[in-house]
Image (cartoon, rainbow, N blue to C red):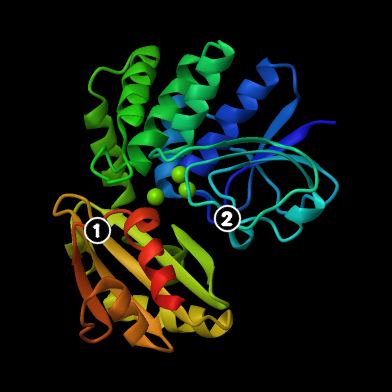
Amino acid sequence: MAAYVFGHTNPDSDSIIGAISLAYLKNQLGQECIPARQGEISPETKFILEKFGGELPLLKTEYAGEDVYIVDHSDLAQSPKDVLEANILGIVDHHKLGDITTSAPLECWIRPVGCSNTVIKEMYDYHGIVIPKNIAGMMLCAILSDTVIFKSPTCTKIDTKACKELASIAGIEDYKALGMEMFKVKSAVEGASARELVMRDYKDFDMSGNKVGVGQLEVVDLSVFDNKKEMLFEDLKALKAEGARHTVMLLLTDIIEEGSQLLVVSDDESIIEKAFETKLQNHEAWLPKVLSRKKQVIPFLEKAFK
Ligand code: MG
Ligand code: MG
Ligand code: MG
């Protein structure tokens, strides 16, 4: 029986490319694997797949009774609803340990690096499997995306080393330029609905029994949101009501200025103010130097909610 490999809901480039790169590795090792995804891909991921001729993973959201590998998350809230009814063969991730548990032993590769594809690169090296040129190019892009071209505090030497090696396999000289090209694609928000923007890179968390959603949009210039704030706030309010959430936040991250404008809709804004030691003005605050949701946002929120 073929196993499925999938990343988190609202898949980002790491989740999509991770499904492709891990499935290829497993196939080379003699285990039949199919790359899958839980949702629609972003313009950034589309750019990467088109650039390197990658195939769009299969859209599949139910996995009861299937063999699966999980990539780029270990939180139930970001996994398929029936994931605990699947046979989880392995997890490859770079986030905090989540609440997915298994009843049988599994293969687990979880490391504090900038990207799941960095971990997968180490798996290829460990097994001595050659990475095809096009997959190397896609993995390179996933790492450049997750580490915000090495600017994110989540980026480690292991990530930069992996990028160098992947770029040489892919035959790409100026990979930082490739990263900027990709972030310019990511910054195009014109024509997208508020819901599309909020959900583009959105995650739900359980924080001490409260449902908390945090979206993030990484752009090269925050002025693209100048006349969109109102519609974004309207949608955050709607999303909060739909899912009986305590809080929904959106980080508008400026990767050049290196900071994030935080938009908040919450039952208790004081928790958010406490988390970031800031005062909200009209439900907004500027968080200087904040680029990483997993390292600079979620840990402080979880602490404030305790
Ligand atoms: Mg991800
Ligand atoms: Mg990732
Ligand atoms: Mg990200």
Which residue is identified by label 2? 98
Q: Residues within 10 Å of mark 1 (few under 14, many from 20)?
A: many
Q: Residues within 10 Å of mark 2 (few under 14, many from 20)?
A: some
Secondary element type, mark 1 = loop
| Above-or-below relation of 144 to 257 | above
Residue depicted at 69% across the width and 16% down the height: 29
Which residue is identified by label 1? 290
Identify which residue, 110 or 286, lies in the foreground.
110
Q: Earlier in the sequence, mark 1 or mark 2?
A: 2
| Above-or-below relation of 220 to 204 | above
User: Could you tell whether 279 is left or right of 99 in the image?
Assistant: left
Q: Which kind of residue does numbered mark 2 sit on? A: Gly
Quarter of the image where one finds residue 177: top left
Whether tag 1 and tag 2 are in contact, CB under 8 A, the answer is: no
Residue 55 visible in the snapshot: no
User: Could you tell whether 97 is left or right of 27 in the image?
Assistant: left
Residue depicted at 22% across the width and 75% down the height: 285
Q: Which kind of residue does numbered mark 1 sit on? A: Val
